[in-house]
Image (cartoon, coloured by chain):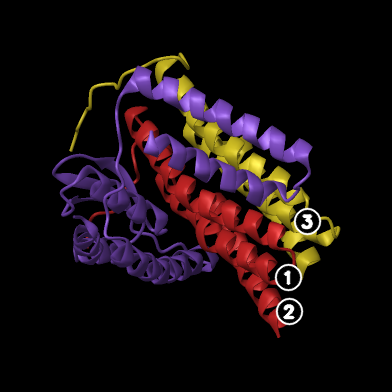
Chain colours: A red, B purple, C yellow
């Protein structure tokens, strides 16, 4: 049972990893690509890491996976924000579509 | 002093969790590392002097993390759908939202939560407002409803 | 499924590499590099399980740390031209 759940989570992780990379290729400008990168790094990462957690019996492995997951959840938004802010100060204009 | 002992305790726990070996050599190396890092942090604090405190209501924070997780999943599904669609249906925009949390820590939690949810990225954060780049009209509207800001403001004490 | 995850991660890293090569702005390239780093962390972890050696997780953990520091360091270098710079540039708030 945990094995099926683990495979399911890994499958979800695969799907969102692909979605993020596809978005990185397809989306039109830097800021929109930033959102795409976030997909891989949040749900894709969470799903893969929890999937791996269900596949292990060793507590040391579990602790490391928890650390990787929590650390990435804390640093990913900081890196994204730093990139967005640096890009704006660097003069990259977002392509906007404000009209309704 | 109590702070330093607590800090060294946290570092020591980290070492034990990551090492998994209990031979005298490894435990000894751990003690040396913990002492060295505590000393370094002590000296860095003397040079810097800024002190940050994590003053949040921890129980409410736990509930908030669960709520945030649900939001992250929803936003992920939304952005992933946009990425897989044959036609790109983006309506990127910049929005300014009033930052409801009053404390520095609250605003940092708020800004990070916004960025962590795909579809919205905090570009600028100051005392009054957050400036956010949103991927679609829906993600901007969800942010402007202020639900997240209110929840973060409730964590402050 | 673990093998599939490893393959997909490699494929997605290749896709991101295309973005890194195409640019067009410097920030696109940094974003792509950061994103490849995150994928590499996952790939190392997944490969460790594939190979039956979860000790690889230590490397993944170290890579996660370095990836974050590297992104911030590169951004700081391009903003200030100096990694040792202190202080904050004044804010320019053009609405």
The number of numbered discs placed on residues in the rendered structure image is: 3
The chain that hosts pointer 2 is A
In front here: A44 or B153? Answer: B153
Q: Which mark is residue A55?
A: 1
Question: In the image, what residue occupies the spot 54% across and 38% down?
Answer: C68
Residue for point 24% across, 54% down: A98
Protein chain holding label 3: C
Q: Quadrant of the N terminus of chain C?
A: bottom right
Disc 1 and disc 3 in contact, CB within 8 angstroms = no
* Vertical side of A94 occupied by B32: above or below: above
Name, please, the residue furthest toward the right.
Answer: C51
> In which quadrant of the rendered view does residue B151 lie?
bottom left
Q: CA distance from mark 1 to mark 2?
A: 7 Å
Residue density around tag 3, few if under 14, some if 14–19, many if 20 or more, within 10 Å: many
Disc 1 residue crowd, few under 14, some 14–19, many 20+, Cα 10 Å = some
Q: Position of residue B59 (x, y in %)?
A: 32, 66
Between disc 3 and disc 2, the foreground one is 3
Q: Residue A3: which disc? A: 2
The answer to whether the residue labelled 3 contacts the one labelled 2, judged by CB atoms less than 8 Å apart, is no
* Residue at x 24% of width, y 41% of height: B125
Q: CA distance from mark 3 to mark 2?
A: 17 Å
Image mark 1: chain = A
* SS of the residue under disc 1: loop
Are both tags, 3 and 2, on one chain? no
In the image: residue C24, left or right of residue B113: right
Return the x and y of residue B121 as percentages of the image width and height.
Answer: 35, 50
Q: Residues within 10 Å of mark 2 (few under 14, many from 20)?
A: few
**Numbered disc 3: secondary structure:** loop
**Residue nearer the viewer, B46 or A30:** B46
């Amino acid at each position: 049972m945990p094995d099926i759940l683990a495979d399911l989570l890994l499958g979800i992780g695969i799907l969102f990893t692909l979605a993020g990379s596809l978005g990185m290729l397809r989306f039109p400008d830097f800021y929109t690509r930033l959102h795409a990168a976030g997909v891989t790094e949040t749900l894709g990462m969470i799903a893969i890491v929890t999937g791996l957690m269900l596949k292990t019996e060793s507590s040391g492995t579990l602790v490391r996976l928890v650390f990787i997951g929590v650390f990435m959840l804390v640093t990913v938004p900081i890196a994204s924000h730093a990139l967005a802010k640096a890009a704006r100060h660097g003069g990259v204009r977002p392509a906007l579509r404000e009209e309704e | 002093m109590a702070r330093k002992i607590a800090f060294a305790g946290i570092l020591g726990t980290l070492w034990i969790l990551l090492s998994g070996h209990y031979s005298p050599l490894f435990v000894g190396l751990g003690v040396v590392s913990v002492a060295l890092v505590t000393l370094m942090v002590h000296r860095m604090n003397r040079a810097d002097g800024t002190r940050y405190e994590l003053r949040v209501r921890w129980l409410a924070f736990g509930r908030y993390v669960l709520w945030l997780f649900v939001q992250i999943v929803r936003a992920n599904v939304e952005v992933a759908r946009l990425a897989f669609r044959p036609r790109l249906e983006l309506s990127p925009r910049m929005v300014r939202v009033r930052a409801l949390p009053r404390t520095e820590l609250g605003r940092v939690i708020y800004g990070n939560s916004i960025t962590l949810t795909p579809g919205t990225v905090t570009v600028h954060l100051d005392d009054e407002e957050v400036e956010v780049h949103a991927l679609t009209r829906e993600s901007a509207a969800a942010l402007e409803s202020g639900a997240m800001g209110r929840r973060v403001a409730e964590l402050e004490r | 499924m673990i093998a599939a995850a490893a393959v997909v991660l490699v494929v997605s890293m290749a896709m991101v590499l295309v973005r890194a090569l195409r640019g067009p702005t410097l920030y696109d390239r940094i974003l792509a590099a950061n994103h490849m780093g995150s994928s590499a962390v996952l790939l190392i972890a997944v490969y460790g399980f594939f190979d039956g050696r979860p000790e690889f997780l230590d490397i993944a953990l170290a890579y996660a740390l370095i990836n974050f520091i590297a992104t911030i360091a590169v951004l700081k270098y391009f903003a200030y031209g100096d990694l040792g710079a202190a202080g904050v540039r004044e804010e320019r708030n053009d609405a």
